Amino acid sequence: MSDEQPTETKSYEPKELGREHSNKVVEFINRKAVSPNDACPVCGSPKNTVAHTAYKIEAQPAEGVPFSGVQMPLFATVCFDCGFVRLFSEMIVNHLIEQEEASKTTATVGGADGD
C-alpha cells in the first residue's frame, strides 16, 4: 500500500465569488424559482441561501452526456433548517446571466435613438 496522497486535490478547491457576481447569481436563481419563497424541497423551509462559493465535482465520462468526464463547476443553495444542498451549473447560469445582460443592453441601445 502506498501512503501517497492524490495530487489532484487542488483542482477541487472551491473559489469564492465576488460580491457583484454573487448578487447576480442570487438574483438569477430567485427569478427562476417557481415560487417567491423557493421553499426547500426536503423540509419546506423558506430559509435558503446561495453559497458565496463556487464548487467543482468530477463528472464521470458518459457517452452522449454534455460536460461528462470533466470537472463541473457549480453554484450551491443551502437550506438553513435541514442542510439540503441544491446545485446549479456555473457554466449555464453564467451563460444565461450574460445573455440577459446582453439583451438588456441591446434593448437600451435600440430604444435610445427615439425611432
Image (cartoon, helix red, strand yellow):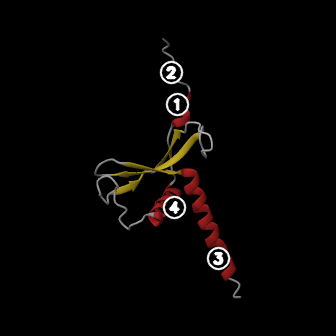
Q: What's the residue type where badge 4 is placed?
A: Lys
Q: In the image, is residue 99 above or below residue 80?
A: below
The residue type indicated by label 2 comes to Gln
State the separation of the CA atoms marked 4 and 2: 37 Å
Residue situated furthest top in the rendering: 1
For image coordinates 28% across by 51% down, the residue present is 81
Circle 4 Cα neighbour tier, 10 Å, few/some/many (<14 / 14–19 / ≥20): some
Label 1 vs label 3: CA separation?
A: 44 Å
Residue assigned mark 2: 5
Disc 2: CA contacts within 10 A as few (<14), some (14-19) or many (>=20):
few
Which picture quadrant has residue 34? bottom left
Query: Residue 35 is drawn in which quadrant?
Result: bottom left
Query: On the image, numbered disc 3 is attached to which residue?
Result: 107
Of callouts 1 and 3, the N-terminal one:
1
Q: Earlier in the sequence, mark 4 or mark 3?
A: 4
Q: Residue furthest bottom?
A: 115
Upstream in sequence: badge 2 or badge 3: 2
Residue to which mark 1 is pinned: 9
Disc 1 marks which amino acid? Thr
From what the image shows, is residue 1 above or below residue 104? above
Q: Amino acid at mark 3?
A: Ala
